[in-house]
Image (cartoon, rainbow, N blue to C red):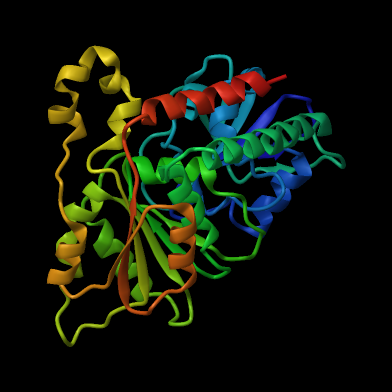
C-alpha cells in the first residue's frame, strides 16, 4: 500500500509477531521517512531507533495521545489498555500489516494492508514526531527521577536494571503479568542493528512454562551471548521444576531475575485493587505465599543471591557466575497502586 503525505497524525504500533516487519531495516526506513512516532512493545523487536517512544503508554492518556488520527499496526499489541482504547476508537483509522502465520483477528473496524511504502520526499509533518520525542524525553526523565527517589527497591527499578544489563546481541526472556508491563515503561530504545532480543510468551497473563522457555531460548543462542530472564515470583514458582535438569543435560548461562513481591502485584493496579475490595483482596488476588526462594534454589543446586537495593542488583547483574543462577530482587506490593497513579499524574502534568 502506498502512503503519501496527507498531514494525518499517524503513529506506528508494534506488538509480537511471527515476522517483525518493524524490526527490519526496511520497516524502520519507512517509519523514519514517514516521520511517525513508533509505539513498540518490548517483545515486538521494534523498540529501536530514533522514532521509538519509550513512555508511549503514559503519553497516550494525554492531549498528545488524543490527537492521533491513524495507526499503522504490526503484530498484536496487547500489553496496555491505552493502546487497546486507541485501536478501538471510532475516530482513529487503523491499518494492520498482516504477518506470517496464523494470528487472532485484527482490531474491530481495522483495514488489512500490505507492507506500506512511503512515497513522499519529506516526512509527514515533522512537528508531529518532534512533539512526541520532546514529550517522551521529558516524561522519561521525570519517571526515572520519581522511581529513583523511592525509598525502597521497586519493580520498575528491577525492570530498568535488567534491561540495562542486556548487551548487544543478548537475549532477555520476560514473564507475563507485571514484569513485561514494568519493562514496557522502563526499557529505553536501543540502536538499530544491536540485536538485543526480547522474548515473551503469547498471552496477557499466561505465566506457566516461562523458566522452561528461558532455558530453551538460552540454549538456542550462541555460547558467547548473555542471556537473562525477568519474571515475577508467581511465574517463578509455577515453573520451578524447570530448574531440575538431569546430570547429562546441557545448562545454559542464564541469569534469572525474580522480582519477588510475595504475590500477584498486577491485581493491585486493576479494579480488584480498589479500596472497596480490600477485605478480600489478599486471599483472592494478592495470594501471598511466603516461599523461601533461597531454600528452593538450594534444593535443586542452583546458585541464589538476594538483593534489596538497585545498587546490589546492578552489581549482581554485572558479575554473572555462569550456568543457571537466580537473583532474587525483593520488592513490595504495598503502595504499588499509588505509585502507578503518580506515574500517570506525571504524564498529565507535563502534557502540553
Q: Position of residue 281 (x, y in %)?
A: 19, 24
Q: Is residue 41 above or below residue 7?
A: below
Question: In the image as oriented, which residue stretches furthest toward the right?
Answer: 121
Residue 344 placement, left or right of 266? right
Which residue: 30% across, 17% down? 274
In the foreground, 197 or 111 = 197
In the foreground, 143 or 305 = 305
- Is residue 98 among what the camera can see? no
Q: Position of residue 18 (x, y in %)?
A: 43, 54
Quadrant of the image for the C terminus? Answer: top right
Quarter of the rendering containing residue 348: top right
Q: How many marks?
A: 0
Q: Is residue 305 above or below residue 106?
A: below
Which residue: 28% across, 40% down? 205
- Is residue 9 among what the camera can see? yes
Which residue: 43% across, 66% down? 316
Question: In the image as oriented, which residue stretches furthest toward the top?
Answer: 276
Question: In the image as oriented, which residue stretches furthest toward the front?
Answer: 151
Quarter of the rendering containing residue 97: top right
Q: Position of residue 93 (x, y in %)?
A: 59, 23
Quadrant of the image for the N terminus? Answer: top right
Q: Position of residue 85 (x, y in %)?
A: 47, 22
Q: Is residue 40 above or below residue 127?
A: below
Quarter of the rendering containing residue 52: top right
Amino acid at each position: 500500500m502506498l502512503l503519501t503525505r496527507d498531514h494525518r497524525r499517524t503513529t506506528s504500533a508494534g506488538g509480537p509477531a511471527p515476522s517483525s516487519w518493524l524490526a527490519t531495516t526496511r520497516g524502520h526506513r519507512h517509519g523514519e521517512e514517514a516521520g511517525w512516532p513508533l509505539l513498540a512493545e518490548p517483545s515486538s523487536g521494534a523498540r529501536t531507533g530514533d522514532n521509538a517512544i519509550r513512555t508511549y503508554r503514559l503519553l497516550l492518556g494525554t492531549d498528545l495521545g488524543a490527537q492521533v488520527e491513524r495507526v499503522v499496526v504490526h503484530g498484536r499489541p496487547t500489553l496496555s489498555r491505552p493502546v487497546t482504547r486507541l485501536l478501538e476508537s471510532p475516530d482513529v483509522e487503523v491499518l494492520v500489516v498482516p504477518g506470517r502465520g496464523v494470528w487472532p483477528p485484527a482490531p474491530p473496524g481495522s483495514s488489512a494492508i500490505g507492507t506500506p511504502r512511503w512515497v513522499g520526499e519529506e516526512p509527514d509533518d515533522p512537528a508531529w514526531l518532534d512533539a512526541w520525542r520532546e514529550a517522551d524525553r521529558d516524561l522519561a526523565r521525570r519517571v526515572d527521577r520519581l522511581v529513583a527517589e523511592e525509598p525502597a527497591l521497586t519493580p520498575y527499578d528491577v525492570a530498568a536494571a535488567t534491561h540495562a544489563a542486556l548487551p548487544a546481541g543478548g537475549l532477555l526472556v520476560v514473564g507475563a503479568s507485571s514484569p513485561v508491563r514494568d519493562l514496557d515503561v522502563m526499557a529505553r530504545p536501543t540502536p538499530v542493528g544491536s540485536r538485543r532480543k526480547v522474548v515473551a510468551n503469547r498471552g496477557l497473563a499466561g505465566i506457566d512454562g516461562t523458566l522452561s522457555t528461558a532455558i530453551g531460548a538460552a540454549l538456542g543462542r550462541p555460547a558467547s551471548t548473555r542471556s537473562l530472564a525477568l519474571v515475577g515470583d508467581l511465574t517463578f514458582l509455577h515453573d520451578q521444576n524447570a530448574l531440575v535438569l538431569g546430570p547429562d543435560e546441557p545448562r545454559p548461562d542464564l541469569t534469572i531475575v525474580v522480582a519477588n513481591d510475595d504475590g500477584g502485584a498486577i491485581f493491585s493496579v486493576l479494579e480488584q485493587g480498589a479500596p472497596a475490595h480490600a477485605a478480600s483482596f489478599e486471599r483472592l488476588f494478592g495470594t501471598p505465599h511466603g516461599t523461601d526462594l533461597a531454600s528452593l534454589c538450594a534444593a535443586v543446586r542452583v546458585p541464589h543471591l538476594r538483593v534489596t537495593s538497585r545498587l546490589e542488583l546492578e552489581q549482581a547483574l554485572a558479575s554473572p557466575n555462569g550456568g543457571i543462577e537466580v537473583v532474587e530482587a525483593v520488592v513490595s506490593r504495598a503502595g504499588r497502586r499509588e505509585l502507578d497513579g503518580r506515574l500517570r499524574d506525571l504524564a498529565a502534568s507535563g502534557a502540553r
